[in-house]
Amino acid sequence: MIRTGSEYREGLQDGREVWIDGERVKDVTKHAAFKPIVDVRARMYDMAHEAEYQDRLTYVDGNERNTIFYKPPRETQDWDDKVEAIDLVLNDIGGVVTRVGDETIGEVWSLIDGRDVLAEFDPKFAQNVDRHVQTILEKDIFHISANTDPKGDRSLPPQEQDPDMMVHVVKETDAGIVIRGAKYETAAAYADQAFLKPTVGAWTNETLSDYAVGGIVDMGSPGVKQICRSSFAGRTNPKDYPLANKFDEIESLVIFDNVLIPWENVFFYRHTKAAQFVRATLHRYSAFPYVHRLLYVADMMIGAALWNAKQTGLDKLQAVREKLADLVCYREGINAHLTAAIATAEKSPGGLLMPNQSLLYAGRVHACANLPAMMHIARELCGGQICVTPNAASFEGDETKPWLDKFYSLNNQWQADDRRKLLAFARDLLNSDYAGHRLTFVQFAQAPHFNHLNAVYNSFDFEGPLEFVRKVAGLSDRVTGAKG
C-alpha cells in the first residue's frame, strides 16, 4: 500500500542516532539541514495519492495500489511508466533528486537474477531476496544503498589494518549475524533502510570471507550511528541559492557498532562468489534512473544558458548558438542512449526486462564523463555575472536597490528581479559549493570512471567487430573471437 508523506515522516521517529556539526539531531523531519529534503520526499509520497497524479505514479495489483517506482520491470511499458513518473515528480518539485529509492531498488532487482548463485551457499538467502523485493513494493519503503567503506590504507589488506575499515561479520547468533564497520551513504539519515554490500573485494582464491556480506539494515537499528556532512541547506538565503536550500541530499558516515542483521534480512554471507556477482551486476537496472536524472541536469543547463542569452540579446549570435548546440548534443546523447536501451531491452536471467546493458553503460559514460565540460560551456554562456552579482538582500535594501535596479534591468521585458533570479539559479547550478559537490557525486556515486568503462567493456559484444575484421582481412578460421 502506498504511503503518505505523514506516514513517511512518522517512520523516521524510530530513535535513530544522527549527528551533524557535532550535535545530535532530535528529529530529522524538523532539523534545518534535513527538513527541506524530507519535505521533498514526503511530497513524492503525497503525489501518489492525488487524483492528478495517482494513475501515473501507481498501479493496482489485486486490491492494493502500489508505486510504479518499485514495480519490477517485465515489459517495455514498465520502463516507459517509470520515465513518465520521474518526469511528473521532478517537474512538480522543481528540481532534481537522485537518492529517493527508485534508483537503488534496482540493486535488489539484480539479486533476483542471481538467486541461483545466492542459493549455492544457503537456499534461504535466495528466498530472502524474493521476500524483500515484495516487502519494499508493498510497504513503499524508502530504500537506499550502502556501498563505500572508509577503506583505510588501500595498500594493505583489511586483515592487516583496523578491521573496521571495511564492514565485516564479527559473530553469528541464532537471531542473525553481527557486523562492524562503516559505510558512506547518501540519504541515510532520512531513509528507512539500506541494502548493505561490500565494495569491490580483492578476493583471490578465497571461497569464504567475513567481509563478503550483504543484507538489509534498518536505519533505526541499535548500534547504527550516523555522522553527517554539513548541509548546504539553511546556511544561506534560499533566494540566493534556490537549489542548495531545497535539494541537498546529505551523506552520512554510517557506523555499524555491533549491529544485528536478522537472518531473514541476509542476502549472502562469507560467500565471495556471491559478493563478486552482486558487484558485477549491481547497476544492471539502477544505472537507468541514475543516468535519467542527468537528462534533467542537462535541461537545467540549457535552460539557464538560453535564458541568459535571451535576456542579454545574444541568442542570435552564431557563436552562442554553437555552444548551445554542444549542450543539446550532450543532452540528446543521454536521451538517445536511454531510449535505445529500453527499445532494445533484454530479458534478464531472472525473467525481468533489463535495459540493453551495452547501450546503458555507454550512456552512463557519456553522461558522467562529459558533465564537467558541459558545465563549463554553460558557465561561459551564463557569463561572469553569475560569480559577481550581489545577493538578494542587496537587491532589497533601501540604499542599494535603486542602483541594482538600474544596472540589472536590461529592457522593458527583463527587469532586475528576473535578472537576479536567473543569475542566482545559474550560480547555484554551476558555481556554488552545492554545484561542486553534485559534480563530484556524479563522478563517483555509481563507482569511479574506470569502473564505468569496465562495465562497458564487459557488456559489449565484441564478436561482431572481430568477425567482420576476420573476414575482410582474410584471417585464418583458426582465429577465435574470445575476449582476452
Image (cartoon, rainbow, N blue to C red):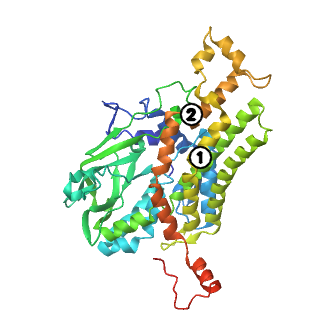
Q: Is residue 410 above or below residue 448?
A: above
Residue 35 is situated, as x and y percent measured from the top left of the image, at 46, 33
Closer-to-camera residue (351/292): 292
Label 1, secondary structure: give it.
helix
- Are dots 1 and 2 in contact, CB under 8 Å? no
Identify the residue at the far top of this view. Answer: 399
Residue 300 visible (yes or no): no
Closer-to-camera residue (463/262): 463
Left or right of 318, for residue 153: left
Location of residue 21 by image quarter = top left
Left or right of 176, for residue 464: right
Comes first in the chain, label 1 or label 2: 1
What is the CA distance from the residue labelled 1 to the residue labelled 2?
A: 17 Å
Location of residue 113 by image quarter = bottom left
Q: Amino acid at mark 2?
A: Asp
Circle number at residue 428: 2
Circle number at residue 294: none
Label 2, secondary structure: give it.
helix
Q: Which residue is pictured at 70% across the width and 21% down the height?
A: 408
Residue 193 is situated, as x and y percent measured from the top left of the image, at 38, 50
Location of residue 361 by image quarter = bottom right
Q: Which residue is pictured at 49% across the width and 50% down the height?
A: 443
Dot 2, how many residues are within 10 Å of its Cα: few (below 14), some (14-19), or many (20+)?
many
Residue 330 visible (yes or no): yes
Which one is closest to the eye, mark 1 or mark 2?
1
Q: Amino acid at mark 1?
A: Ala
Left or right of 7, for residue 175: left
The residue labelled by disc 1 is: 373
Q: Which residue is pictured at 63% across the width and 17% down the height?
A: 395
Dot 1, how many residues are within 10 Å of its Cα: few (below 14), some (14-19), or many (20+)?
few
> For the image shown, how many numbered marks are present on the structure?
2
